[in-house]
Image (tube, helix red, strand yellow):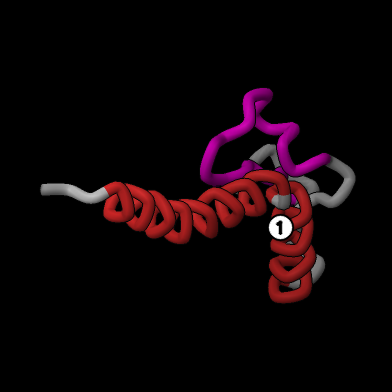
Amino acid sequence: MKRAGDTREAGILAAWILGPLLIGGLLWFFTQPLRAELLQEQVNALLGERYALDPALPPAALPKTRLPLGTWYALRDSAQRA
């Protein structure tokens, strides 16, 4: 026989597991532009002037739709994308 306390304890356990996952997912989603900008700065510092990503274009400008797990960048002085 199930007691009323068992259901309550299961709900509390589920909240402890799902709460941090929900908060982490929301933070990941809403900080994407900041993470893309930081990635662009780090790649430009690593590659130097010749192969740098173009900072004049916003990261999500190419293609016109945003990708759920990534971003296209334009290479400086080139029609190629990375």
Query: Which residue is the site of mark 1?
Result: 35
The residue at 35%/57% (across/down) is 9
Q: Residues within 10 Å of mark 1 (few under 14, many from 20)?
A: few
Query: Is-magenta flag for residue 70?
Result: yes
Note whether 29 is above or below 19 in the view shown: above
Which residue is at 43% across, 56% downward?
12
Q: In the rendering, at what x and y percent does residue 59 appear?
A: 74, 43
Front-lying residue, 7 or 55: 7
Q: Nearer the viewer, residue 54 or 11?
A: 11
- Magenta region, main secondary structure: loop
Any part of residue 51 in sight: no
Location of residue 65 (image quadrant): top right
Q: Amino acid at mark 1?
A: Arg
Q: Residue at x 75, y 48 (%)?
A: 33
Q: Residue at x 32, y 54 (%)?
A: 5
Q: Position of residue 73 (x, y in %)?
A: 68, 45
Q: Magenta residues?
A: 58-75
Dot 1: what SS? helix
Q: Is residue 64 magenta?
A: yes
Is residue 35 something that shows in the picture? yes
| 47 sits to left or right of 19 | right
